[in-house]
Image: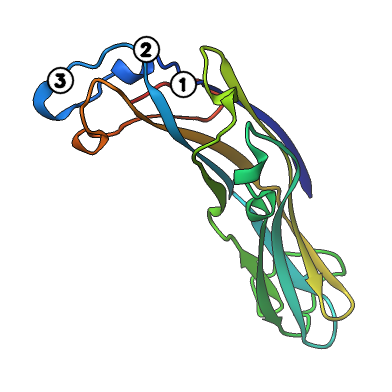
Amino acid sequence: MPSAQNVTIFLPQFDPLSDMTLETTYLGGTSPSPGATLTSVEISISTFISGANVQLDNDSNQPQDGTGLVTSVVNSLTVPDNDVVNPFLLQISEGQLFNLEATSGDAFGFTNTGNTDYANWSPGVLTGNSGGVNGSGFNPTYIGTADLEFTIKSTYTAGATFSGNDGYFQGNTPSGQFQAEITYTYETSAIPEPSSALLGVFGGMLALMRRRRC
């Protein structure tokens, strides 16, 4: 029961002439002059699986093990800086083992018997996270007044495996979400000592919509 998803999120670049003045607190109340030096960029990517459900039914005359499975495979990932994001960490794989007794006498094929030959599994919300910090020498792609593109293509699957024959399952396909966050840290020459200022942080997090926050 696979479900494919293709999501694109746009987050703004760091604008040295405006972003640094947004709700930024400086010790001593010093007002910054226009212009800032970007010192580091942190990217955070998260994926979520929710709503998965797998039901297993053993129609064999012998007990057997059944395992419910929920997985997320990242088919492709586009971010501004591939060096700080590990797509492997965004893969999700969760399984639950059940010891199913011999059939309770129901017909072949999946039947919700509610007896010991049946199991019902809902794993809740599953997550995968990746990201990192790009310090000195970061890609100038981050600086400007345009948008940065974050795109992920994933396949979500719910299923089951059995240790023997005559095992059947059904369930609902999970849904997925994708979140991207970027945080900019900078210094400004308006402050005599960089350590005397609270570093300004600008970040954005969206789920299919653009949001700017400080």
Q: Disc 2 on helix, strand or loop? A: loop
Residue 200 as seen in the image, left or right of residue 159: left
Judging depth in this view, the residue of 169 and 49 nearest the camera is 49
Q: Which label's residue is closer to the chain start, 3 or 1?
A: 1
Image x and y of residue 60, in percent = 85, 81
Disc 2 target residue: 18
Judging depth in this view, the residue of 140 and 15 nearest the camera is 140
Disc 1 target residue: 14
In the rendered image, which quarter is residue 164 located in?
A: bottom right
**Cα gap from disc 2 to disc 1, whole angstroms:** 9 Å
Q: Which quadrant of the rendered structure holds the C terminus?
A: top left
Q: Work out which residue is located at the far front of the displayed protein and give it.
A: 192
**Cα gap from disc 3 to disc 2, whole angstroms:** 16 Å
Judging depth in this view, the residue of 161 and 210 nearest the camera is 210
**Residue pictured at 54% horizontal, 37% vertical:** 179
Q: Disc 1 on helix, strand or loop? A: loop
Q: Work out which residue is located at the far left of the displayed protein and give it.
A: 28
Disc 3 target residue: 30
39 is higher (above) or lower (below) than 143:
below
Image x and y of residue 212, in percent = 41, 21
**Residue pictured at 65% horizontal, 44% vertical:** 83
Indicate the amino acid at tag 2: Ser
Residue 117 as seen in the image, left or right of residue 34: right
Q: Are marks 2 and 1 in contact (CB under 8 Å)?
A: no
185 is higher (above) or lower (below) than 175:
above
Foreground disc of the pair 3, 2? 3
**Residue pictured at 81% horizontal, 75% vertical:** 162
Indicate the amino acid at tag 3: Thr
Could you say which disc has been placed on residue 117 in the image? Answer: none
